[in-house]
Amino acid sequence: MNIGKCTRPLGAATLMLLLAQAGAAQETLKLGISAPMSGSAATWGLGMEWAAEQAAEHVNEDGGVTVDGKTYNFEVVTYDNKYSATEGARNAQTMLNRDGVKFIAGSIGTAPVRAMQALTERNGVILFNTAWGKSVKGPQFRYTFTQMNTPFEILEPFYSFIKEQHPDLETAVLISPNDATGQELEPVAVETWKSLGVEMLASDWYERGTTEFQPIATKIASLDPGLVDFSAAPPTDVGSILKELDVLGWEGVKVMTAGTSVEALMAVAGDAAEGAYLGASADFSSDSATEVQKKLNAGAREALGEPLNGITISSYDAILALRAAMQEADSVDPEKIKDVLPSVRFDSSYGPSGFGGADVYDYPQQMLIPVIVTQVVDGKAVELTRSNPAELEALSND
Amino acid sequence: MELFVQLLANTLQIGAVYVLFALGLTLIFGVMKIVNFAHGAFFTAAALIVTSMVPFATVELGVPLWAGYLLAAFAAIAVVLSIGALVYSIGFQHVLKDLNGSFILSIGLLLILNGAYLAIYGGAPRSVPQVLPGTVNVFGATLTAQRLALVIVAAVVTGGLYLLIERTRLGLALRAVAMDQEAAMLQGIPYRRVALYGFLIGAALAACAGVLMAPINAVTPVSGDEFLIKAFIIIIIGGLGSVTGAIIGGLFIAMVESVGGYFFDPSTATLAMFILVIGFLLVRPQGILGNVE
């Protein structure tokens, strides 16, 4: 009897505590990240996770997101997709079914993103991604939004700039990873070089995870092209090929369309990486960077040992876009947010931004940010030029 | 002519590590009749230890790079041998000649070790400065001094293993156990102890391969996985349990990778390897030098 008297209030208190905790948990929105956290592309995943955490912290410190009279905080949950479709699908299952994630703030790799889309589109989950493939976009994928520039934004200004710097350039070799990202980039790259009067001597493929690059380096060296374009290859793989090319005495223009992490590149290639042009990197410590970017960049250097780049900083911008869309929709319902996102205006780390790209993708789901061309100079990424897409110019002038 | 010399040099450079790695795998299979899916984890452990020990030795202890590398190499091999002895005593000695049991055990061990490496070292690629900088020209083929050293060391280790197996009592015991375990035991050979030695030699060979690769390629917690797949291809082609087969298979696969990668592309060369394995499994499942059981 006495035990009953004690346990009933204790039980009631425990129940209330659990309910209170459940209530508090409802005010935290989990933002998923699905990115390579291991392997040669791990630097991208680690940086993206860090930038997302900074954005979540920034939003939470600002008082969270208040919609419909209720305040929500952000929490980032990260999963390693190992740059594979299998892991991408597994991550989507875990995020959606176990963790109840309704917003994915960053996902890397066309194949993993495609695998995730099968679930996110069907279940009405917002999917921000950095996939370079065109196949992940279109009016049929209304929950999908791209948070960084892709080949369709980068290639034309990037390649044109390089051709201007090297007007005598006549021949090139393209080496691409044999996956969805590489396969969708390759024809666009070949066509763009061709339009600039550069003959493609060979366009070869390699499997992600390859460790021995001497055979391909031997082939490139024997073809002796004026330029080698490493397409969507991650910095570690490019570093390995550049090192082998250096041993074989090849000297030409080095182009990393997906060039991001100079630190990872230098760690493997050393001086062989000097002079390489990077299409997806940025010098966020330069005068052209915003104060937000400078601060984030310095923080990333301290926390990760390397600066941010176009891929890694994108999760920060995705989260700011998401916050703006939630406030605009006055809801955290992904159904309403996906309708607001194409027209939302927000302050990205680059400055005022929004979404566009309807001319290319038939739906405005491409984040509008500048295309920045950098080059490896004395082991560091130095910004050479930047250009704003026409839609971003128009948006800035509004 | 220069091109073919270069392709041959590429074959030897690539094949040297494949041979060391596959020798360990095939030796363990030959003696214990198990397939060790965690073999790549031994390779990775050694390479990762080198990436962390070299900076420690050169910066903290102030020793020259070559001395730091040697120190790291010994430490890496010692750690791998310790891990090998531990997992043998806890697990593998209970699943000798049990393919199903060893499969489950080694897959589980691989997951645990890969998870541990990821937790300790993080997922980002790690690198070690070249211990022997510069390039050398051998009959028109250009290769780094580091790669040349790798080929020489791998050849010495392979030769040493061959002598150990052919000329020593332990080698005789290993061969006897590999041929017929029960007959070997009837002759007084302590099977479990010989199996332990075989397992440790195999682990040491994987560690050697990892130590040699660390200054050449970027190292990640899953570096060994790529080599493990290649090693399976090699021992299927060379013949499960055959030391000479592993050497022939290793060099053959390296040649396919080198020549195929040059005349076609690396992806096609990889595809060709898998087609070759399928062909061997259909036509000669025992491999080039393996025995039919």
Image (cartoon, rainbow, N blue to C red):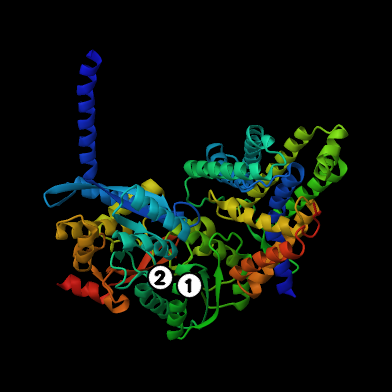
Label placed on residue A133: 2
Rendering coords of residue B235 (x, y %): 72, 55
Q: How many marks?
A: 2
Crowding near the residue tagged with mark 1, few <14, some 14–19, many ≥20 C-alpha atoms within 10 Å: some
Residue B98 picture quarter? top right
Whether B82 is drawn above or below A226: the answer is: above
Residue in view at x 11 percent, y 49 percent: A69
Label placed on residue B32: none
Residue B201 picture quarter? top right
Q: Quadrant of the N terminus of chain A?
A: top left
Rendering coords of residue B38 (x, y %): 62, 45
Q: Is residue B52 visible?
A: no
First in residue order: circle 2 vs circle 1: 2
The extreme top residue here reads: A2
Residue in view at x 39 percent, y 65 percent: A131
**Which residue is identified by label 1?**
A183
Residue B266 picture quarter? bottom right
Rendering coords of residue A215 (x, y %): 64, 68
The extreme left residue here reads: A69
Residue in view at x 64 percent, y 41 percent: B101
Q: Are marks 2 and 1 in contact (CB under 8 Å)?
A: yes
Which amino acid type is shown beneath numbered disc 2?
A: Gly
Labels 2 and 1 positioned on one and the same chain: yes
| Mark 2 residue element | loop
Spatial separation of the CA atoms under disc 2 and disc 1: 8 Å
Q: Is residue A373 visible?
A: yes
B254 to the left or right of A335: right
Which amino acid type is shown beneath numbered disc 1?
A: Gln
**Subunit of mark 1?**
A
